[in-house]
């Protein structure tokens, strides 16, 4: 079964014939939906909660990823909004990232030695599963939605947005886009043996790359437009693959 993780902009995204399930995990309860998309069973997780009450640093990442595994999910496709820092990630563009730089702190980022999990180091050279990345890219091509094939995701702590100096630093570090939720989500998926990849949509230029303050109305408009395309992409992805 495929697990879909959605965030900002997807608060009203729903499956067909939905059943809401509460999954008990060693790290707390998680509520998610199981239903049909393109006549296939899918587990849908709103990482911020359906009412978007959880800030990025408050998300119970360990509980959420454990709950997906408990439901029988083997493949996870996550969707995330980002700020663009490279030309390829201008507002309105889509990217399937292939790398991450983690700038977060204080988040519970491992199952190491807890809940019966073995103390093993994961290979995180390539943080996203390549076969899932290619499936997303193939679905985008079928849906005639242009998606950039690679990019480095800078994951920041949030909930505040970044300073102009922080953005300049991240660009010098080789980052192309900035978001707040890919870590520790991707690392926890790897620890649990889940195949995980992301598709990101840029809703604004990162701080300091254009003159003036961020325009939150423009961000909202970009988000609404992108979500429509991404829902179409996800439908094609689910229809074309047996995860």
Image (cartoon, helix red, strand yellow):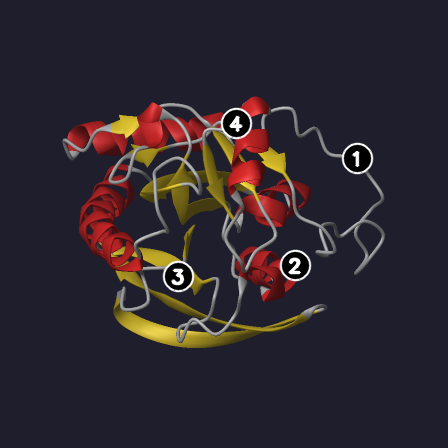
- Number of residues whose C-alpha sits closer than 10 Å to that of mark 1, classed few (under 14), some (14–19) or many (20 or more): few
Q: Earlier in the sequence, mark 1 or mark 2?
A: 2
Label 1 – label 2 distance at C-alpha: 17 Å
Circles 3 and 1 in contact, beta carbons < 8 Å: no
The residue located at (34%, 37%) in the rendering is 210
Q: Earlier in the sequence, mark 4 or mark 2?
A: 2
Specify the quadrant that holds the C terminus: top left
Q: Give residue 171's mark.
A: 4
Front one among 151 and 98: 151
- For disc 2, the marked residue is 62
Can you tell which quarter of the image residue 95 is in? top left
Q: Give residue 121's mark.
A: 1
In the image, residue 100 above or below residue 12: above
Q: Earlier in the sequence, mark 4 or mark 1?
A: 1
Can you tell which quarter of the image residue 136 is in? top left
- Number of residues whose C-alpha sits closer than 10 Å to that of mark 2, classed few (under 14), some (14–19) or many (20 or more): many
In the image, residue 50 above or below residue 218: below
Q: In this view, does 124 lie to the left or right of 88?
A: right
Circles 4 and 3 in contact, beta carbons < 8 Å: no
Secondary structure state at the residue bearing disc 1: loop
């Amino acid at each position: 079964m495929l697990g879909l993780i959605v965030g900002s902009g997807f608060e009203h995204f729903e499956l067909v014939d939905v059943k809401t399930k509460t999954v008990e995990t060693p790290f707390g309860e998680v509520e998610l939906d199981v239903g049909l998309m393109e006549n296939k069973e899918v587990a849908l997780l709103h990482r911020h909660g359906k009412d978007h009450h959880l800030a990025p640093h408050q998300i119970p990442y360990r509980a959420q990823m454990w709950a997906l595994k408990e439901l029988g999910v083997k493949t996870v496709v996550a969707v995330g909004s980002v700020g663009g820092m490279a030309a390829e990630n201008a507002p309105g563009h889509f990217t399937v990232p292939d790398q991450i730089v983690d700038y977060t702190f204080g988040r519970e980022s491992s199952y190491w030695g807890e809940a019966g999990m073995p103390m093993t180091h994961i290979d995180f050279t390539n943080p996203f599963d390549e076969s899932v990345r290619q499936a997303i890219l193939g679905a985008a091509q079928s849906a005639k939605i242009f998606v950039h094939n690679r990019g480095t995701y800078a994951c920041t702590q949030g909930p505040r947005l970044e300073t102009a100096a922080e953005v300049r630093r991240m660009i010098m570090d080789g980052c192309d886009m900035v978001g707040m939720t890919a870590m520790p989500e991707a690392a926890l998926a790897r620890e649990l043996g889940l195949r995980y990849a992301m598709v990101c949509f840029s809703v604004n230029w990162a701080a300091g790359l254009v003159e003036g303050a961020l325009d939150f109305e423009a961000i909202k408009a970009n988000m609404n437009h992108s979500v429509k395309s991404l829902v179409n992409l996800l439908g094609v992805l689910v229809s074309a693959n047996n995860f």
